[in-house]
Amino acid sequence: MLLAIPMIALAFGVLLLQLANRPARLIYLVPLLLAFEYRLQIGGLSMDLAECSVLVVLLVWLAHAWERRKTKSATGISRDGWLIFLLALCALPSIFFEYDLHHAVSAYRDLLWPFLFFFVFVRIGLNCEQIDALIKVTCLLALVNAALGIAQFFTGNYVWLAGPDELEWQAYKTGLAKLSSLGGHLGVGDTLPVGLYTGANNFACYLSTPLCLVTTLAFSRQLTKRQQMGSVIAAGILLACLLFTIFRSGLLIYVVSMMLLYLFLSSRKGVLRFFVVAVLGVALALTFVSEGLFDWDQFGSIAGREKMISESWALIKAHPELLLTGGFTDLYHLQSKEPQEIHNLFLYSVVQFGLPATLLFYTFFIRLLWLALSIAKRASGLHRDVLAAVTVSLGCNIFLYGATTMLIDSVQTSIWLLFWTGVAAHLALFLRCKMPPAASSALHGRHVFAGNAALPGAESA
Protein backbone atom coordinates (compact mmCIF):
# COMPACT_ATOMS: atom_id res chain seq x y z
CA MET A 1 0.00 0.00 0.00
CA LEU A 2 2.87 2.37 0.84
CA LEU A 3 4.45 1.65 -2.56
CA ALA A 4 1.27 2.85 -4.28
CA ILE A 5 1.75 6.41 -2.98
CA PRO A 6 5.08 7.12 -4.77
CA MET A 7 3.80 5.32 -7.89
CA ILE A 8 0.69 7.57 -8.03
CA ALA A 9 2.84 10.64 -7.36
CA LEU A 10 5.24 9.62 -10.17
CA ALA A 11 2.37 9.04 -12.61
CA PHE A 12 0.86 12.40 -11.67
CA GLY A 13 4.24 14.10 -12.18
CA VAL A 14 4.65 12.52 -15.63
CA LEU A 15 1.14 13.67 -16.53
CA LEU A 16 1.91 17.24 -15.46
CA LEU A 17 5.15 17.17 -17.44
CA GLN A 18 3.30 16.01 -20.56
CA LEU A 19 0.69 18.72 -20.11
CA ALA A 20 3.36 21.37 -19.58
CA ASN A 21 5.04 20.24 -22.80
CA ARG A 22 1.76 20.30 -24.76
CA PRO A 23 -1.06 22.13 -22.90
CA ALA A 24 -3.55 21.29 -25.68
CA ARG A 25 -3.54 17.70 -24.42
CA LEU A 26 -5.81 18.92 -21.64
CA ILE A 27 -8.69 18.39 -24.08
CA TYR A 28 -8.55 14.65 -23.36
CA LEU A 29 -9.67 15.37 -19.80
CA VAL A 30 -13.14 16.24 -21.12
CA PRO A 31 -14.21 12.62 -21.85
CA LEU A 32 -12.84 11.64 -18.43
CA LEU A 33 -14.86 14.33 -16.64
CA LEU A 34 -17.99 13.19 -18.50
CA ALA A 35 -17.40 9.49 -17.78
CA PHE A 36 -18.52 9.75 -14.15
CA GLU A 37 -20.97 11.79 -12.13
CA TYR A 38 -19.99 13.36 -8.84
CA ARG A 39 -21.53 16.40 -7.18
CA LEU A 40 -19.53 18.69 -4.93
CA GLN A 41 -21.13 20.55 -2.04
CA ILE A 42 -19.08 23.55 -0.93
CA GLY A 43 -21.15 25.52 1.55
CA GLY A 44 -24.20 26.71 -0.35
CA LEU A 45 -22.54 25.99 -3.73
CA SER A 46 -23.35 22.74 -5.50
CA MET A 47 -21.77 21.66 -8.79
CA ASP A 48 -21.02 18.57 -10.86
CA LEU A 49 -17.37 17.89 -11.61
CA ALA A 50 -18.41 17.61 -15.27
CA GLU A 51 -18.89 21.39 -15.20
CA CYS A 52 -15.08 21.68 -15.02
CA SER A 53 -15.15 20.71 -18.72
CA VAL A 54 -15.82 24.39 -19.46
CA LEU A 55 -12.61 25.35 -17.66
CA VAL A 56 -10.71 22.66 -19.57
CA VAL A 57 -11.83 23.86 -23.02
CA LEU A 58 -11.09 27.46 -22.04
CA LEU A 59 -7.54 26.48 -21.06
CA VAL A 60 -7.08 24.56 -24.32
CA TRP A 61 -8.41 27.51 -26.32
CA LEU A 62 -5.94 29.81 -24.54
CA ALA A 63 -3.12 27.32 -25.18
CA HIS A 64 -3.96 27.20 -28.90
CA ALA A 65 -4.26 30.98 -29.01
CA TRP A 66 -0.82 31.30 -27.39
CA GLU A 67 0.77 28.83 -29.81
CA ARG A 68 -0.82 30.26 -32.95
CA ARG A 69 -0.93 33.92 -31.82
CA LYS A 70 -4.25 34.12 -33.70
CA THR A 71 -7.41 32.03 -33.82
CA LYS A 72 -10.41 32.00 -36.11
CA SER A 73 -12.70 32.79 -33.21
CA ALA A 74 -11.37 36.37 -33.32
CA THR A 75 -12.91 36.96 -36.77
CA GLY A 76 -16.46 37.30 -35.53
CA ILE A 77 -19.45 35.68 -33.83
CA SER A 78 -21.25 33.13 -35.97
CA ARG A 79 -24.91 32.18 -35.94
CA ASP A 80 -24.59 29.57 -33.23
CA GLY A 81 -23.09 32.28 -31.01
CA TRP A 82 -26.03 34.56 -31.66
CA LEU A 83 -28.51 31.75 -30.93
CA ILE A 84 -26.80 31.05 -27.60
CA PHE A 85 -26.78 34.76 -26.74
CA LEU A 86 -30.50 35.08 -27.55
CA LEU A 87 -31.22 31.92 -25.55
CA ALA A 88 -29.47 33.40 -22.52
CA LEU A 89 -31.38 36.64 -22.95
CA CYS A 90 -34.81 35.04 -23.37
CA ALA A 91 -34.34 32.63 -20.44
CA LEU A 92 -33.15 35.36 -18.06
CA PRO A 93 -36.63 36.65 -16.97
CA SER A 94 -37.50 33.19 -15.63
CA ILE A 95 -35.20 33.82 -12.65
CA PHE A 96 -37.35 36.66 -11.34
CA PHE A 97 -40.68 34.82 -11.46
CA GLU A 98 -39.73 31.82 -9.28
CA TYR A 99 -40.35 31.79 -5.54
CA ASP A 100 -37.02 30.05 -4.90
CA LEU A 101 -34.46 32.46 -6.36
CA HIS A 102 -31.51 30.21 -5.54
CA HIS A 103 -33.04 27.27 -7.42
CA ALA A 104 -34.00 29.54 -10.34
CA VAL A 105 -30.42 30.82 -10.70
CA SER A 106 -29.14 27.24 -10.50
CA ALA A 107 -31.55 26.09 -13.25
CA TYR A 108 -30.51 29.05 -15.44
CA ARG A 109 -26.85 28.19 -14.95
CA ASP A 110 -27.49 24.51 -15.73
CA LEU A 111 -29.13 25.54 -19.00
CA LEU A 112 -26.40 27.90 -20.22
CA TRP A 113 -23.21 26.35 -18.84
CA PRO A 114 -23.27 23.46 -21.38
CA PHE A 115 -23.86 25.95 -24.21
CA LEU A 116 -20.82 27.92 -23.04
CA PHE A 117 -18.87 24.65 -23.22
CA PHE A 118 -20.05 24.12 -26.80
CA PHE A 119 -19.32 27.73 -27.80
CA VAL A 120 -15.66 27.38 -26.76
CA PHE A 121 -15.25 23.74 -27.84
CA VAL A 122 -16.04 24.43 -31.49
CA ARG A 123 -13.66 27.42 -31.54
CA ILE A 124 -10.55 25.69 -30.24
CA GLY A 125 -9.38 24.67 -33.72
CA LEU A 126 -8.91 20.94 -33.14
CA ASN A 127 -7.63 18.88 -36.06
CA CYS A 128 -8.97 15.61 -37.41
CA GLU A 129 -6.54 13.44 -35.44
CA GLN A 130 -7.52 15.10 -32.16
CA ILE A 131 -11.24 14.59 -32.82
CA ASP A 132 -10.61 10.94 -33.74
CA ALA A 133 -8.68 10.50 -30.49
CA LEU A 134 -11.49 12.15 -28.49
CA ILE A 135 -14.04 9.76 -30.02
CA LYS A 136 -11.86 6.73 -29.26
CA VAL A 137 -11.19 7.80 -25.67
CA THR A 138 -14.88 8.51 -25.06
CA CYS A 139 -16.01 5.16 -26.48
CA LEU A 140 -13.30 3.33 -24.52
CA LEU A 141 -14.42 4.96 -21.27
CA ALA A 142 -18.03 4.06 -22.09
CA LEU A 143 -16.93 0.46 -22.65
CA VAL A 144 -15.12 0.37 -19.30
CA ASN A 145 -18.20 1.87 -17.64
CA ALA A 146 -20.41 -0.74 -19.30
CA ALA A 147 -18.16 -3.58 -18.08
CA LEU A 148 -18.41 -2.15 -14.56
CA GLY A 149 -22.19 -1.90 -14.96
CA ILE A 150 -22.43 -5.59 -15.91
CA ALA A 151 -20.36 -6.48 -12.84
CA GLN A 152 -22.70 -4.36 -10.70
CA PHE A 153 -25.75 -6.14 -12.11
CA PHE A 154 -24.47 -9.65 -11.37
CA THR A 155 -22.72 -9.01 -8.05
CA GLY A 156 -24.77 -6.22 -6.48
CA ASN A 157 -21.49 -4.48 -5.55
CA TYR A 158 -19.36 -1.55 -6.77
CA VAL A 159 -22.29 0.88 -6.82
CA TRP A 160 -20.04 3.58 -5.40
CA LEU A 161 -21.73 6.77 -6.55
CA ALA A 162 -25.44 5.87 -6.38
CA GLY A 163 -27.24 7.93 -3.75
CA PRO A 164 -29.85 6.75 -1.22
CA ASP A 165 -32.72 8.01 -3.38
CA GLU A 166 -31.46 6.05 -6.37
CA LEU A 167 -31.08 2.86 -4.34
CA GLU A 168 -34.60 3.27 -2.99
CA TRP A 169 -35.92 3.72 -6.54
CA GLN A 170 -33.93 0.68 -7.70
CA ALA A 171 -35.51 -1.45 -4.96
CA TYR A 172 -38.96 -0.44 -6.24
CA LYS A 173 -38.10 -0.89 -9.93
CA THR A 174 -36.30 -4.22 -9.57
CA GLY A 175 -39.17 -5.59 -7.50
CA LEU A 176 -41.55 -4.91 -10.39
CA ALA A 177 -39.04 -5.95 -13.07
CA LYS A 178 -38.66 -9.39 -11.50
CA LEU A 179 -42.35 -10.02 -12.21
CA SER A 180 -41.99 -9.26 -15.94
CA SER A 181 -40.94 -11.67 -18.68
CA LEU A 182 -37.88 -9.61 -19.58
CA GLY A 183 -36.79 -9.31 -15.96
CA GLY A 184 -37.14 -13.06 -15.52
CA HIS A 185 -35.03 -13.78 -18.62
CA LEU A 186 -32.34 -11.30 -17.58
CA GLY A 187 -32.20 -12.58 -14.01
CA VAL A 188 -32.79 -9.21 -12.37
CA GLY A 189 -31.30 -9.05 -8.88
CA ASP A 190 -31.37 -6.20 -6.40
CA THR A 191 -29.02 -3.83 -8.23
CA LEU A 192 -29.22 -2.14 -11.61
CA PRO A 193 -26.10 -0.93 -13.44
CA VAL A 194 -25.17 2.69 -12.80
CA GLY A 195 -21.49 2.57 -13.79
CA LEU A 196 -19.77 5.60 -12.35
CA TYR A 197 -23.02 7.55 -12.32
CA THR A 198 -25.56 8.31 -9.62
CA GLY A 199 -28.53 6.79 -11.47
CA ALA A 200 -29.35 4.10 -14.01
CA ASN A 201 -31.23 6.42 -16.39
CA ASN A 202 -28.38 8.95 -16.66
CA PHE A 203 -25.97 6.07 -17.17
CA ALA A 204 -28.12 4.62 -19.97
CA CYS A 205 -28.22 8.02 -21.68
CA TYR A 206 -24.42 8.16 -21.47
CA LEU A 207 -24.17 4.75 -23.22
CA SER A 208 -26.60 5.51 -26.06
CA THR A 209 -24.37 7.43 -28.50
CA PRO A 210 -21.24 5.22 -28.12
CA LEU A 211 -23.47 2.15 -28.60
CA CYS A 212 -25.01 3.58 -31.76
CA LEU A 213 -21.56 4.54 -33.04
CA VAL A 214 -19.80 1.20 -32.49
CA THR A 215 -22.79 -0.71 -33.91
CA THR A 216 -22.53 1.40 -37.07
CA LEU A 217 -18.78 0.71 -37.24
CA ALA A 218 -19.42 -3.01 -36.89
CA PHE A 219 -21.18 -2.93 -40.27
CA SER A 220 -18.90 -0.37 -41.91
CA ARG A 221 -17.03 -1.53 -45.00
CA GLN A 222 -14.31 1.01 -44.24
CA LEU A 223 -12.90 -1.17 -41.43
CA THR A 224 -10.90 -4.37 -41.52
CA LYS A 225 -12.42 -7.66 -40.37
CA ARG A 226 -10.49 -7.45 -37.10
CA GLN A 227 -11.70 -3.91 -36.45
CA GLN A 228 -15.27 -4.94 -37.26
CA MET A 229 -15.03 -7.84 -34.83
CA GLY A 230 -13.75 -5.51 -32.13
CA SER A 231 -16.70 -3.21 -32.80
CA VAL A 232 -19.12 -6.14 -32.57
CA ILE A 233 -17.69 -7.14 -29.17
CA ALA A 234 -17.83 -3.56 -27.90
CA ALA A 235 -21.42 -3.17 -29.14
CA GLY A 236 -22.38 -6.43 -27.41
CA ILE A 237 -20.98 -5.26 -24.07
CA LEU A 238 -22.65 -1.84 -24.33
CA LEU A 239 -26.00 -3.33 -25.40
CA ALA A 240 -25.92 -5.94 -22.62
CA CYS A 241 -25.33 -3.21 -20.05
CA LEU A 242 -28.11 -1.10 -21.55
CA LEU A 243 -30.48 -4.08 -21.28
CA PHE A 244 -29.55 -4.60 -17.65
CA THR A 245 -30.44 -0.99 -16.81
CA ILE A 246 -34.10 -1.93 -17.54
CA PHE A 247 -34.44 1.39 -19.35
CA ARG A 248 -37.09 1.09 -22.06
CA SER A 249 -36.53 4.57 -23.51
CA GLY A 250 -32.83 3.80 -23.98
CA LEU A 251 -33.63 0.59 -25.87
CA LEU A 252 -36.20 2.43 -28.00
CA ILE A 253 -33.69 5.18 -28.85
CA TYR A 254 -31.10 2.60 -29.86
CA VAL A 255 -33.43 0.62 -32.12
CA VAL A 256 -34.94 3.70 -33.76
CA SER A 257 -31.46 5.19 -34.28
CA MET A 258 -30.27 2.05 -36.03
CA MET A 259 -33.35 1.94 -38.27
CA LEU A 260 -32.83 5.57 -39.30
CA LEU A 261 -29.14 4.92 -39.92
CA TYR A 262 -30.02 1.95 -42.10
CA LEU A 263 -32.22 4.23 -44.21
CA PHE A 264 -29.49 6.87 -44.37
CA LEU A 265 -26.44 4.67 -45.00
CA SER A 266 -27.88 1.71 -46.88
CA SER A 267 -26.74 1.28 -50.48
CA ARG A 268 -29.98 -0.55 -51.36
CA LYS A 269 -32.19 1.29 -53.81
CA GLY A 270 -35.94 1.45 -54.28
CA VAL A 271 -38.56 0.59 -51.69
CA LEU A 272 -36.77 -2.44 -50.23
CA ARG A 273 -34.99 -0.60 -47.45
CA PHE A 274 -38.19 1.25 -46.52
CA PHE A 275 -40.02 -2.08 -46.41
CA VAL A 276 -37.35 -3.53 -44.10
CA VAL A 277 -37.58 -0.54 -41.75
CA ALA A 278 -41.39 -0.68 -41.79
CA VAL A 279 -41.36 -4.35 -40.80
CA LEU A 280 -38.86 -3.65 -38.02
CA GLY A 281 -40.97 -0.70 -36.84
CA VAL A 282 -44.11 -2.84 -36.62
CA ALA A 283 -42.17 -5.55 -34.77
CA LEU A 284 -40.80 -2.94 -32.37
CA ALA A 285 -44.26 -1.52 -31.70
CA LEU A 286 -45.71 -4.99 -31.06
CA THR A 287 -42.81 -5.79 -28.72
CA PHE A 288 -43.36 -2.70 -26.61
CA VAL A 289 -47.12 -3.14 -26.33
CA SER A 290 -47.08 -6.91 -25.88
CA GLU A 291 -48.40 -8.15 -22.58
CA GLY A 292 -45.83 -9.11 -19.99
CA LEU A 293 -42.58 -8.06 -21.70
CA PHE A 294 -42.05 -4.36 -20.91
CA ASP A 295 -44.99 -3.79 -18.59
CA TRP A 296 -43.41 -4.02 -15.11
CA ASP A 297 -44.41 -0.44 -14.29
CA GLN A 298 -46.44 0.30 -17.39
CA PHE A 299 -49.45 1.79 -15.69
CA GLY A 300 -47.48 3.78 -13.12
CA SER A 301 -45.06 5.31 -15.64
CA ILE A 302 -47.59 6.18 -18.35
CA ALA A 303 -50.23 7.43 -15.93
CA GLY A 304 -47.65 9.50 -14.06
CA ARG A 305 -46.36 11.15 -17.24
CA GLU A 306 -49.86 11.81 -18.51
CA LYS A 307 -50.71 13.48 -15.22
CA MET A 308 -47.60 15.68 -15.40
CA ILE A 309 -48.35 16.70 -18.97
CA SER A 310 -52.06 17.41 -18.35
CA GLU A 311 -51.25 19.47 -15.23
CA SER A 312 -48.61 21.46 -17.08
CA TRP A 313 -51.11 22.25 -19.86
CA ALA A 314 -53.65 23.30 -17.22
CA LEU A 315 -51.03 25.63 -15.70
CA ILE A 316 -50.28 27.17 -19.12
CA LYS A 317 -54.01 27.78 -19.75
CA ALA A 318 -54.43 29.37 -16.31
CA HIS A 319 -51.28 31.51 -16.63
CA PRO A 320 -50.59 32.17 -20.34
CA GLU A 321 -48.08 34.84 -19.32
CA LEU A 322 -45.61 32.05 -18.51
CA LEU A 323 -45.26 31.47 -22.26
CA LEU A 324 -43.34 34.73 -22.46
CA THR A 325 -41.24 34.61 -19.29
CA GLY A 326 -41.20 31.09 -17.85
CA GLY A 327 -40.38 30.87 -14.16
CA PHE A 328 -43.51 28.96 -13.09
CA THR A 329 -41.92 25.68 -11.97
CA ASP A 330 -42.49 26.39 -8.27
CA LEU A 331 -46.15 27.17 -8.94
CA TYR A 332 -46.46 23.95 -10.93
CA HIS A 333 -45.22 21.94 -7.95
CA LEU A 334 -47.55 23.79 -5.57
CA GLN A 335 -50.60 23.10 -7.72
CA SER A 336 -49.82 19.53 -8.75
CA LYS A 337 -48.13 18.31 -5.54
CA GLU A 338 -45.79 16.43 -7.88
CA PRO A 339 -42.21 16.15 -6.50
CA GLN A 340 -40.73 15.32 -9.90
CA GLU A 341 -40.17 17.73 -12.76
CA ILE A 342 -42.37 17.57 -15.88
CA HIS A 343 -41.26 14.49 -17.82
CA ASN A 344 -41.38 16.18 -21.21
CA LEU A 345 -38.52 18.31 -22.50
CA PHE A 346 -40.67 20.81 -24.41
CA LEU A 347 -43.20 21.43 -21.62
CA TYR A 348 -40.54 21.46 -18.91
CA SER A 349 -38.58 24.08 -20.84
CA VAL A 350 -41.68 26.20 -21.52
CA VAL A 351 -42.73 26.24 -17.85
CA GLN A 352 -39.16 26.77 -16.64
CA PHE A 353 -37.75 29.19 -19.25
CA GLY A 354 -40.64 30.34 -21.47
CA LEU A 355 -41.63 29.64 -25.07
CA PRO A 356 -39.10 31.97 -26.81
CA ALA A 357 -36.15 30.30 -25.03
CA THR A 358 -37.60 26.85 -25.78
CA LEU A 359 -37.97 27.61 -29.49
CA LEU A 360 -34.39 28.92 -29.60
CA PHE A 361 -33.19 25.74 -27.86
CA TYR A 362 -34.84 23.51 -30.47
CA THR A 363 -33.76 25.81 -33.32
CA PHE A 364 -30.14 25.48 -32.19
CA PHE A 365 -30.17 21.68 -32.33
CA ILE A 366 -32.39 21.31 -35.42
CA ARG A 367 -30.18 23.66 -37.41
CA LEU A 368 -26.86 22.08 -36.46
CA LEU A 369 -28.05 18.48 -36.79
CA TRP A 370 -29.71 19.19 -40.13
CA LEU A 371 -26.54 20.78 -41.51
CA ALA A 372 -24.45 17.86 -40.25
CA LEU A 373 -26.74 15.35 -41.97
CA SER A 374 -26.71 17.45 -45.16
CA ILE A 375 -22.91 17.28 -45.23
CA ALA A 376 -22.89 13.55 -44.39
CA LYS A 377 -25.34 12.88 -47.23
CA ARG A 378 -22.89 14.32 -49.77
CA ALA A 379 -19.76 12.75 -48.24
CA SER A 380 -18.26 9.27 -48.17
CA GLY A 381 -15.82 7.24 -46.10
CA LEU A 382 -15.52 6.28 -42.46
CA HIS A 383 -15.96 9.79 -41.08
CA ARG A 384 -19.27 10.01 -42.91
CA ASP A 385 -20.52 6.88 -41.11
CA VAL A 386 -19.33 8.24 -37.75
CA LEU A 387 -20.95 11.63 -38.37
CA ALA A 388 -24.25 10.04 -39.37
CA ALA A 389 -24.28 7.77 -36.29
CA VAL A 390 -23.51 10.60 -33.87
CA THR A 391 -26.03 12.98 -35.44
CA VAL A 392 -28.90 10.48 -35.60
CA SER A 393 -28.27 9.36 -32.02
CA LEU A 394 -28.27 12.96 -30.80
CA GLY A 395 -31.51 13.66 -32.64
CA CYS A 396 -33.22 10.62 -31.13
CA ASN A 397 -32.05 11.56 -27.64
CA ILE A 398 -33.33 15.12 -27.93
CA PHE A 399 -36.63 14.47 -29.68
CA LEU A 400 -37.53 10.89 -28.72
CA TYR A 401 -36.08 10.57 -25.22
CA GLY A 402 -36.98 14.21 -24.64
CA ALA A 403 -40.65 13.27 -25.09
CA THR A 404 -40.49 11.20 -21.89
CA THR A 405 -38.13 13.22 -19.69
CA MET A 406 -36.89 16.77 -19.11
CA LEU A 407 -33.28 15.86 -20.07
CA ILE A 408 -31.76 19.34 -19.57
CA ASP A 409 -32.44 19.35 -15.82
CA SER A 410 -29.09 17.50 -15.51
CA VAL A 411 -26.09 19.66 -16.38
CA GLN A 412 -24.02 16.47 -16.75
CA THR A 413 -26.34 15.13 -19.46
CA SER A 414 -26.54 18.51 -21.22
CA ILE A 415 -22.74 18.85 -21.42
CA TRP A 416 -22.57 15.27 -22.67
CA LEU A 417 -25.06 16.02 -25.47
CA LEU A 418 -23.29 19.24 -26.45
CA PHE A 419 -19.91 17.49 -26.39
CA TRP A 420 -21.18 15.04 -29.02
CA THR A 421 -22.77 17.93 -30.92
CA GLY A 422 -19.38 19.63 -31.00
CA VAL A 423 -17.75 16.39 -32.21
CA ALA A 424 -20.33 16.23 -35.02
CA ALA A 425 -19.54 19.86 -35.85
CA HIS A 426 -15.83 19.16 -36.26
CA LEU A 427 -16.48 16.01 -38.32
CA ALA A 428 -18.81 18.00 -40.59
CA LEU A 429 -16.03 20.50 -41.22
CA PHE A 430 -13.48 17.85 -42.13
CA LEU A 431 -15.92 16.18 -44.51
CA ARG A 432 -16.87 19.47 -46.12
CA CYS A 433 -13.22 20.34 -46.71
CA LYS A 434 -12.75 17.02 -48.54
CA MET A 435 -15.79 17.49 -50.78
CA PRO A 436 -15.44 18.26 -54.49
CA PRO A 437 -15.98 21.97 -55.23
CA ALA A 438 -19.43 21.34 -56.76
CA ALA A 439 -20.73 19.50 -53.69
CA SER A 440 -19.17 21.99 -51.29
CA SER A 441 -20.66 24.97 -53.15
CA ALA A 442 -24.15 23.54 -52.52
CA LEU A 443 -23.55 24.26 -48.84
CA HIS A 444 -21.88 27.64 -49.43
CA GLY A 445 -23.04 30.38 -47.13
CA ARG A 446 -24.31 28.05 -44.41
CA HIS A 447 -21.86 29.26 -41.78
CA VAL A 448 -22.17 26.82 -38.93
CA PHE A 449 -19.41 27.78 -36.58
CA ALA A 450 -16.73 30.23 -35.63
CA GLY A 451 -15.84 33.25 -37.65
CA ASN A 452 -16.05 33.26 -41.43
CA ALA A 453 -15.25 29.55 -41.66
CA ALA A 454 -18.07 27.03 -41.72
CA LEU A 455 -16.45 25.17 -38.84
CA PRO A 456 -13.38 25.69 -36.65
CA GLY A 457 -10.03 24.22 -37.59
CA ALA A 458 -10.47 24.18 -41.37
CA GLU A 459 -6.79 24.83 -41.89
CA SER A 460 -5.88 21.59 -40.11
CA ALA A 461 -8.41 19.27 -41.75
Image (cartoon, grey):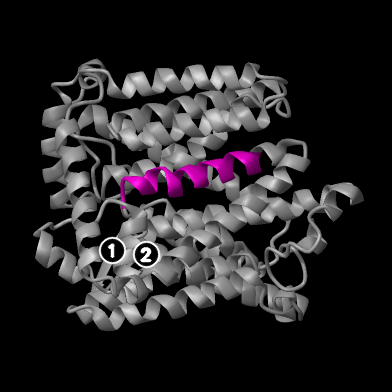
Residue 382 seen in render: yes
Give the answer, above or below, for where 132 lies relative to 70: above
Kindly identify the residue that appears in the image at 25 percent across and 80 percent down: 97
- The answer to whether residue 360 is left or right of residue 351 is right
Foreground of the two, 159 or 113: 113
Residue at the bottom extreme of this rendering: 96
* Crowd band around label 1 with a 10 angstrom C-alpha radius: few (<14), some (14–19), many (20+): some
Is residue 404 shown in magenta?
Answer: yes
Q: Which quadrant holds residue 136?
A: top right
What's the amino acid at mark 1?
Answer: Arg
Secondary element type, mark 2:
helix
Magenta span: 386-405
Secondary element type, mark 1:
strand
The numbered disc on residue 49 is 2
Rendering coords of residue 406 (x, y %): 32, 54
Q: Which residue is mark 1?
A: 39
Kindly identify the residue that appears in the image at 34 percent across and 28 percent down: 243
Q: Which quadrant holds residue 266?
A: top right
- The answer to whether residue 450 is left or right of residue 380 is left
Q: What secondary structure prevails in the magenta region?
A: helix
* Crowd band around label 2 with a 10 angstrom C-alpha radius: few (<14), some (14–19), many (20+): some
Query: Tags 1 and 2 in contact by the CB under 8 Å rule?
Result: yes
Kindly identify the residue that appears in the image at 43 percent across and 70 percent down: 357
Give the answer, above or below, for where 203 lies relative to 325: above
